[in-house]
């Protein structure tokens, strides 16, 4: 993976983290106001869930490059993929 | 009868609002992959300034507030601004390596003259100001107005009481017909 590609992936991770944190926060606020009498824990849960989703996406993106190369290497060695 | 229906109606309204919020979040790609999130971010960046301008025109604030400046701080450009300085200085160092190892010197020369990617100078990330401004400006009313338009929003708000009473009377009539 080149440095430019890695930089773009980190770029996307950062933006995705902010988006999911904001979305989780927003949904947490909505649920807290509507169902849970303005308690704090739905907001924390929503924010944490959003951050967790962003972390999982980032992890998947960063690992996907090596997974793709590993699949290609296995196919090359075994010649059983086509 | 009304005492039984009112809490149910209240719960149904809350569930509808919450369900709608979750649906909008999922449908717009905010809870999907990082590519979908980036697309949603780009759509919001493209849609928010015209929506703000339209609202400002509607409320007559155009003359009072100056035009919103486009803040495009690019940390990438600032980070990589020193590469020209590096390219000037490095030729002084390369001749010291030539005597030791010509192959290594060639690699270093390629490295220093940007034929290969520099390891620390090519990091790219979104401008921080864009992310901060997105977080501040991303409110539900702005998104709704950018999608549906100012005029539609204001006319809908003004027609809402009459529409609500019409729907309520239709609902009561339907309930009466069911009871008969």
Image: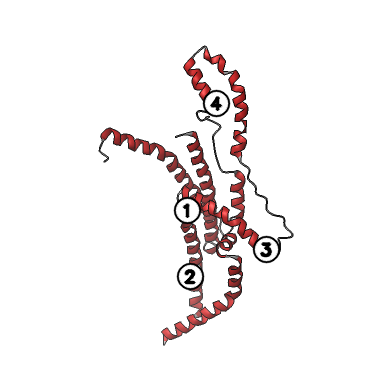
Question: Which residue has dot 1 on it?
Answer: B31
Query: Mark 2 and 1 residues: CB-CB less than 8 Å, in contact?
Result: no
Image-based side of A46 in relation to B74, left or right: left
Instruction: Tell me if mark 3 has few (under 14), some (14-19) or many (20+) residues whose alpha carbon lies within 10 angstroms of its own.
Output: few
Please name the residue shown 69% across and 65% down the image: B59
Query: Does label 1 lie on the same chain as label 3?
Result: yes
Between circles 3 and 2, the one closer to the viewer is 3
Q: Are marks 3 and 2 on the same chain?
A: yes
Name the chain letter of the residue that bears numbered label 1. Answer: B
Residue on which the image places disc 3:
B57
Q: Mark 2 or 1 closer to N-term?
A: 2
Image position, residue B12 (x, y; %): 48, 70
- Colour setup of the view: secondary structure
SS at mark 4 in the image: loop
Q: Earlier in the sequence, mark 4 or mark 1?
A: 1
Say which label, 3 or 2, has the lower sequence index.
Answer: 2
Against B139, residue B79 (above or below) is above
Which residue has dot 2 on it?
Answer: B12
Residue B148 horizontal/vertical position (percent): 55, 65
Q: Marks 4/1: CA distance?
A: 42 Å
Q: Residue furthest right?
A: B64
- Chain that bears disc 4: B
Q: Which mark is residue B113?
A: 4
Q: CA separation, marks 2 and 1?
A: 25 Å
Q: Quadrant of residue B48?
A: bottom right
Which of pointers 2 and 4 lies earlier in the amino acid sequence?
A: 2
Of mark 3 and mark 1, the one earlier in the sequence is 1
The answer to whether mark 3 and mark 2 are in CB contact below 8 A is: no
- Inter-mark Cα distance, 4 to 3: 52 Å
Tag on residue B170?
none
- Observer-side mark, 2 or 1, equals 1
């Amino acid at each position: 993976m080149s440095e430019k590609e890695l930089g773009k992936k980190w770029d996307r991770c950062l933006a995705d983290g902010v988006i999911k944190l904001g979305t989780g926060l927003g949904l947490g606020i909505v649920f807290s106001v509507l169902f849970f009498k303005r308690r704090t824990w739905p907001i924390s849960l929503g924010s944490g869930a959003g951050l967790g989703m962003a972390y999982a996406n980032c992890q998947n993106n960063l690992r996907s490059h090596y997974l793709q190369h590993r699949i290609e290497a296995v196919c090359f060695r075994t010649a059983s993929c086509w | 009868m009304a005492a039984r229906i009112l809490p149910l109606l209240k719960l149904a309204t809350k569930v509808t609002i919450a369900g709608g919020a979750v649906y909008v979040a999922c449908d717009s790609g905010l809870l999907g992959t990082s590519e979908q999130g980036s697309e949603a971010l780009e759509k919001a960046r493209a849609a928010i300034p015209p929506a703000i301008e339209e609202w400002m025109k509607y409320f007559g604030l155009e003359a009072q507030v100056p035009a919103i400046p486009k803040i495009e701080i690019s940390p990438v450009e600032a980070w990589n601004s020193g590469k020209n300085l590096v390219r000037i200085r490095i030729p002084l160092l390369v001749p010291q390596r030539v005597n030791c190892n010509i192959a290594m010197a060639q690699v270093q020369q390629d490295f220093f003259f940007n034929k290969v990617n520099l390891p620390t100078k090519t990091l790219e990330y979104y401008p921080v100001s864009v992310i901060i401004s997105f977080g501040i400006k991303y409110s539900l009313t702005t998104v709704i107005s950018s999608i549906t338009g100012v005029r539609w929003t204001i006319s809908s708000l003004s027609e809402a009481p009459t529409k609500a009473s019409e729907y309520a009377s239709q609902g009561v009539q339907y309930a009466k017909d069911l009871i008969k």
